Amino acid sequence: MKYFIVLCLVSVTLAEEKSACQLHRERELAKEAIPGRLVPECEEDGSYKAMQCHSGGSRFCQCWGEDGTILTAPSTRLTACKCIREKATAEERGKHMVGVFVPDCEPDGTYLKKQCWPSTGHCWCADKDGNKVTEPTRSGVQCE
């Protein structure tokens, strides 16, 4: 009997609590399958994946925050969500802090080639993933 109690305690201790994303995913999978529905995808840590795509051959995807906040409307143009997520986080942070850098994003979710930080007056060229390809400067920046 003692072994049974110890085994039960170990099982309960080892059982992981499910994240909001994992629970959301389970709820959606339990529903009737409807073409074009969205069943959330979760990261290994339980947070929501940045890009969420509708099922059933639909090409519509959306960007979501780690907490499941919907950041964009469904679109067939999205190819990335890193910039959109970073922008949403920075805008939220900017409500409480002056001078926060907020990236500019293309409609497909990638970074604009020219990024500027208005509070410092600096601009630079960036690649589609947001990596700086030129040094920040206050003089005119031309990005090709």
Image (cartoon, helix red, strand yellow):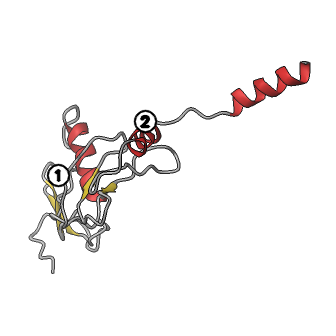
Q: Quadrant of the C terminus?
A: bottom left
Asked if residue 109 lies left or right of residue 56, the reply is left
Residue at point 28% right, 41% down? 69
Residue 120: image x %, image y %?
Answer: 17, 52
Picture quadrant where residue 70 is located: top left
Q: Which residue is mark 1?
A: 73
Q: Quadrant of the N terminus?
A: top right
Residue at point 29% right, 58% down? 81
Mark yes or no: residue 49 visible.
yes
Q: Which residue is mark 2?
A: 20
Residue type of the residue flagged with mark 2: Ala
Q: Secondary structure at mark 2?
A: helix
Residue 75: image x %, image y %?
Answer: 18, 60
Residue 80: image x %, image y %?
Answer: 29, 64
Asked if residue 41 lies left or right of residue 86, the reply is right
Query: 31 above or below 54?
Result: above
| Viewer-nearest residue: 19 or 129 | 19
> Sequence-wise, which precedes: disc 2 or disc 1?
2
